[in-house]
Structures are given as C-alpha cells and as structure tokens.
Amino acid sequence: MSLAASRTGRERVRDLVDSPSFQRVIVVLIVLNAAALGLETSPAIMERWGNVVDSVAWLTVGVFVVEIGLRIFAHRADFFRDPWSLFDLFVVAIALIPDSGAFGVLRVLRVLRVLRLLSTVRSMRRVVGALIATIPGMLSVGTLLVMILYIAAVMATQMFGGVAPEAFGSLPRALVSMFQIMTVDNWTVVIGPVVEVHPWAWLFFIGYLLITAYVVLNLFIAVAVEALDHQHGDEPDETAMAITELRDEVRRLRERLESSSGDRTDDAAR
C-alpha cells in the first residue's frame, strides 16, 4: 500500500502543478515579482516602501522555489527533458544568487524572472517556437537583403561618389548611407545633394527604397506569419488532448484498483 500511496501522492502533485488554476496563480506571482523589480529602481519608493517591496519580491521567489520542487517531484526525470522546465529552473536559480560579493554583478539578471511568462503562458510559448522556426527563413531573407544593400552601395559609390563624397565617397560610407535610406531615417537629407546635381537619381533611390523597405522587409513578416501558422497547426487539438488525458486517468484508476485488489487477496490468504 505504501507504493500505491506514494504513486497516488505524486499523481496528485502532478495534477496540481499542471492545473490551469495553478498556472494562473504563478502568472499573477510573476507579474507581482516583475512589478517589485521595477519599483526597486526608484530610490524614493524604496526609501518609503523598501521593506514591503523586498518582502513581495522574496515571497514570490520562495513560491517559485517551492513550485520548481513540486514539479521535479511530480515529473521526476521528465522535468529535466523539457527545455521550458530547464529554463524555469535556470531563472529561479539566478534569483537565489546573493547580491553582494563576487556575484553582485549578477544582480541585474534577476529581471530575467519576467521571462518566466514565456514558459508559463501557452500562447507565448507558441510565439517563441514560431520565432525559432523562422531562423532558417530569416537567414535566407537576410542574405538577400545584404546582397541588395551591397550591390546598391557599389553602384551608388560609382555614380555619386564625386557628387556627395561624405555619403558615397567610399564603399563603407555608401553602405551606411544606403542602410539609412533603407530604414527611411532622414533619407531625403542623404540623397538631397545628389538629386540637386542629378535629378534622375530619384529613380535609383526610390526603386532601392521600394525593394528593400517594402518588399524584402515584408518578407521577414511573411516568414514569421507562416512559421506561426505552422506552429499553431502542429499543436494537438484540445479535444484530442482531453481524450488522451482521460485515457491516462482511466489507466491510473485501473492500476489503483488492481493494486488494491491484490493487497486484499494477500490479506485474505493470510
């Protein structure tokens, strides 16, 4: 019976830490902890309410430590196989580093506790997964953008280097200027001296601006949206998840009944 009781206790803890209500409480505590970290940056507030702010911060950290302990007890080795669980463990461990001594410089890392929202809120996990999935596509689009920037900078250096040497007199200057034009940061000031001498230069710069700012950069958005849709499509349906959880619950109940029946048979035989 002791083994069955131990298994039942672990299952109850797992049901607790995996329940939506428990997750919502953790989210509220994360927000409170983030607010406390923000208030610590105000000397006036800390002078008057420092004890309260510190108490809230350490109380939430204590709850986080207990939460991590319960999750390790409930999931055991599975906890260390989950990247998000390891991330939570890392963030909570940083909070326990002392503020003084050689580790004082790591005090600034306490703000990373706010990132626990990424692992706690499912929609945020989906966004992070989508961002990771976009890396190959982003690299391809980024390479295309660098190629266009380089080609345009070489052409601008050859065509306008003599007219506006401060902006296009050399390839490095031209690269900076063309990047500034791509970001639409005072781009009319950059091309102004060139257009005064070569009015047709508008065609070159506007064409470059359309290609980079309105075509290539939008490809980044397209890649991100596609990855997010793909990430959402790969997630299991909530109904299927509910059925799976129900099957697991039935299996656990059957194991408990079999274990209880076996113990009664042994007692009767004695």
Image (cartoon, helix red, strand yellow):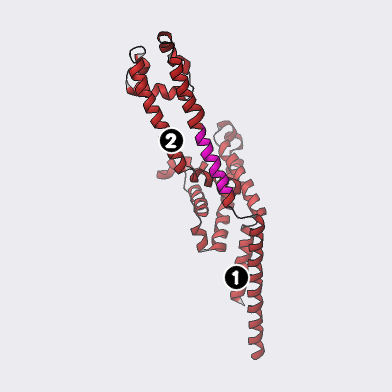
| Image-based side of 73 in relation to 268, left or right | left
Asked which quadrant contains residue 34, the reply is top right
Tell me the SS state at disc 1. helix
Of residue 109 and residue 82, the one placed in the foreground of this image is: 82
Which residue corresponds to the image point at 64% horizontal and 59% vertical from the top-left?
240
Q: Amino acid at mark 1?
A: Arg
**Label tally:** 2
Looking at the magenta stretch, what is its main secondary structure? helix
Nearest to the observer: residue 42 or residue 168: 168
Query: From the viewer's perspective, is 201 left or right of 70?
Result: left
Residue 26 magenta-highlighted: no
Residue 186, relative to residue 49: is it above or below?
Answer: above
Q: Quadrant of the C terminus?
A: bottom right
Provide the residue span drawn in magenta.
218-232
Q: Which residue is mark 1?
A: 7
Badge 1: residue crowd in 10 Å (few <14, some 14–19, many ≥20): some
Residue at 41% over, 44% down? 101
Q: Quadrant of the N terminus?
A: bottom right
Is residue 8 among the parts visible in the rendering? yes
Camera-side residue of 249 and 132: 132
Q: Is residue 174 above or below residue 249?
A: above
Identity of the residue drawn at 50% across and 30% down: 215
